[in-house]
Image (cartoon, rainbow, N blue to C red):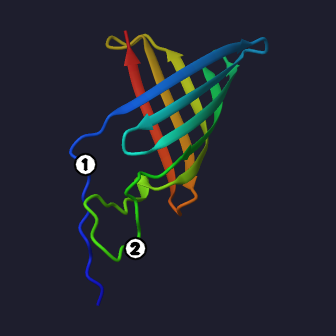
Amino acid sequence: VEERIIESLPASRTRHSLLGRVAQWLPWNGALKASYRFYADDWGITAHSAEFELDQRLHPYLYIGALYRIHTQTKVRFYAEHLTTEPELRTADSDLAAFDAQTVGGKVSLDMPFSWDFARRVHVDLAVERYFRTNHLEVMVYTCELGFSR
């Protein structure tokens, strides 16, 4: 029987990130948004993320959207899945491993005026995203948002 070695992380972590975003209104009543994020920390991770979103208005109160995100990162210096000795720092956390990830998603949004006493506008979002990465994590995310404004 193999004995498990307990994770040991540094006491502190210094992180840096740089983010850039652009948005462009499209002449057919749509919008294209793009962003890029660079990340680095003193544990040895560097990461790059790019995201693209396209929104299209179908009616004054209704629009749809599509999303694509790609992310790649290196592992921390002390990442290991199999150890023969017990080094001072160690982890097998898959979020700290090297991996590539993608997200694909879509949404439907309703933004309607109302004449209620407590709200003049109601906003509803229904969305689904599929997140998957090379170290075998896959997630389906379903969201429903409801908001009121005066």
Query: Which residue carries the number 1 mark?
Result: 10
Q: Secondary structure at mark 2?
A: loop
Q: Quadrant of residue 6?
A: bottom left
Frontmost residue, 88 versus 32: 88
Q: Quadrant of residue 62?
A: top right
Relative horizontal placement of residue 30, taking residue 75 as reference (left or right): right
Which dot marks residue 48? none
Q: Quadrant of the C terminus?
A: top left
Q: At label 2, which amino acid type do we have?
A: His
Relative horizontal placement of residue 84, taking residue 107 as reference (left or right): left
Which dot marks residue 82? 2
Return the residue found at the far left.
Answer: 11
Q: At label 1, which amino acid type do we have?
A: Pro
Return the residue found at the far right.
Answer: 28
Q: CA distance from mark 1 to mark 2?
A: 19 Å
Which residue is pictured at 42% across the width and 45% down the height?
44
Q: Quadrant of the N terminus?
A: bottom left
Q: Secondary structure at mark 1?
A: loop
Return the residue found at the far bottom.
Answer: 1
Query: At which x and y percent is residue 36?
Result: 59, 28
Which residue is pictured at 50% across the width and 60% down the height?
137
Establish if 82 lies above or below 45. Answer: below
Query: At which x and y percent is residue 118?
Result: 32, 13
The answer to the question of whether label 1 and label 2 lie on touching residues, with beta carbons closer than 8 A, is no
Relative horizontal placement of residue 62, taking residue 77 as reference (left or right): right
Which residue is pictured at 57% across the width and 49% down the height?
101
Establish if 38 lies above or below 91. Answer: above
